[in-house]
Image: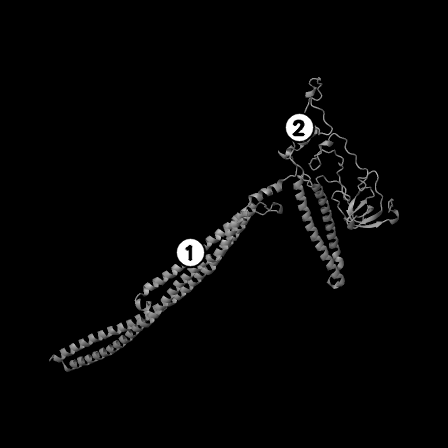
Amino acid sequence: MSWGTDLWDQFENLDKHTQWGIDFLERYAKFVKERLEIEQTYAKQLRNLVKKYCPKRSKDDEPRFTSCLSFYSILNELNDYAGQREVVAEEMGHRVYGELMRYSQDLKAERKHHLQEGRKAQQYLDQCWKQMDNSKKKFERECREAEKSQIMFERLDNDINATKSEVEKAKSQLYLRTHMADESKNEYAAQLQNFNAEQWKHFNTAIPLIFKNLQDMDERRTVKLGETYRSFAEVERKVIPIISKCLEGMVTAAKNVDERRDSGIVVESFKSGFEPPGDFPFEDFSQNIQRTGSDGTIGTPKNDPGKPDPKHAIGKAKNKLWLFGKKPKAPNLEDLSHLPPEQRRKKLQQRIDELNRELQKEMDQRDALNKMKDVYEKNPQMGDPGSLQPKISETICNMEKLRSEIHKNETWLAEVEGGKQSTRSDRRPSTDVNHHAPHGRESPEGSYTDDHSQEHRTPPQPDPHEFDDEFDDDDPLPAIGHCKALYSFDGSNEGTLVMKEDEVLYVIEEDKGDGWTRVRKQSGVEGYVPTSYVEITLEKHSKGAVTYI
């Protein structure tokens, strides 16, 4: 089928049809635009939903329950799913909508060109027809005038009264009109021949070519629509594998929910480490009542020295009733002694691990600065080695502080793991002097001893040499040297001593390998300072005796 041959006389209808085709293409483009806007809005709402239910959390608030972890995994998968919806919108905008709008502009320009060519051809044919029609009308007029002249000549020629001059004049007029009619006839014949040639060319060459071009344009438009329909579907098909992975991830997250593990986490999070309280003993208030010999057998015997005192047992149980009720509020102490033993142990271990990581960073920074200093010393043109010394000193200071914190927390951790409250270590002072508390009493961390046989007995006497290495206020240790502070030290930790830069102190105990030196101020205050913060001078000849610097 060809528009040029079958629709040679349907120029106006083809004009309307091609315009409808372009309008339909633009309507489909508008549909695609609204669809991608829906995808964009959907993706944006999904991301906002994920953001709403996945707020920022601190490190301590990280979820550990499998149900929480699975839910956040689902949120992450949903966020990825929203990203795929954004990909769909972007691809539709680029591969479908944008392509359709560019093609629509090209179609409009091409259609306009073909229709202009058709109108020009029609105008030229109309012009040829007008010329032929004018020549035809002229020929018709001349023929009528010639017929009139002939009738006039014949009438005068047959009239005996007509003069010869009148007859000659009529004859001459007839000859003129006949000649003009012949010329009009020839002109009309020529115009008619030209019009027929142009008309044949118009309907057999020009119009078929123009209509064929319009047909090709319309068919290309139809093909383009089919291609964009396919692209519209391909955009969705391309993201289906990734969307399927997102959905599979959600299913996997659902399968990872483990109720037994969550229950174990609850136990791990809230386990106090205390033992359940024992039975309440019977409190006999009739012991002081004098009984007769006959009913003395029903009296309650006096306490056996080897058995626990019920009063103390009652007191002990009462002190632990908070395990079943509301726990009394306790201040947040630095050593975390306000926490139950198990929770305290975990918190201390976390703090030690974090401090060790920070210490490792400081050590790496110190090593890097020392290497840089060596490079500067070997190549002075690269930099001044002395400019790095303040930074190196600051790093060393930070290292010592971190070591001090680690040592302190490790001491507390050892106390928890040993099941007793902190006592003074062999290198660090402690404020706890309750070493002689009788068994069965509440320990400072809230735990109790189980040896009831020691209640109401004389507390054991302390070993006279037990605190030889601790501070002795009655018999201060002699100075074995002196030291000068290279840096200031805040002494914020327990057992440490505040010192200022360039301050001179007495050395009363050397560093035993843990990085701390025991010193005394001239005012008599004793404590520990970092060994790397001081410049020590020992008096070899006066060990064990006080030497005044």
Image point (69%, 48%), residue name: 355
Q: Which residue is mark 1?
A: 31
Q: Residue 447's spot in the image, x, y percent?
A: 69, 36
Q: Which residue is mark 2?
A: 281
For numbered disc 1, what is the local secondary structure? helix
In the drawing, does residue 278 fall left or right of residue 383? left
Q: Nearer the viewer, residue 4 or 399?
A: 399
Quadrant in which the N terminus is drawn: bottom left
Residue 47 appears in view: no
- Amino acid type of disc 2? Pro
In the drawing, does residue 37 fall left or right of residue 342? left
Q: Nearer the viewer, mark 1 or mark 2?
A: 2
For numbered disc 2, what is the local secondary structure? loop
Q: Residue 529's spot in the image, x, y percent?
A: 78, 46
Image color mode: one colour
Give the CA separation, mark 1 to mark 2: 85 Å
- Amino acid type of disc 1? Phe
Which is more N-terminal, label 2 or label 1? 1
Q: Based on the displayed image, in which of its 4 quarters is residue 197 positioned?
A: bottom left
Q: Residue 207's spot in the image, x, y percent?
A: 33, 70
Examine the rendered structure and indicate whether residue 170 appears above or below residue 103.
Answer: below
Q: Based on the displayed image, in which of its 4 quarters is residue 349 positioned?
A: top right
Q: Nearer the viewer, residue 475 or 24?
A: 475
Extreme residue in the left direction? 160
Residue 182 appears in view: yes
Q: Nearer the viewer, residue 194 or 49?
A: 49
Dots 1, 2 in contact, CB < 8 A:
no
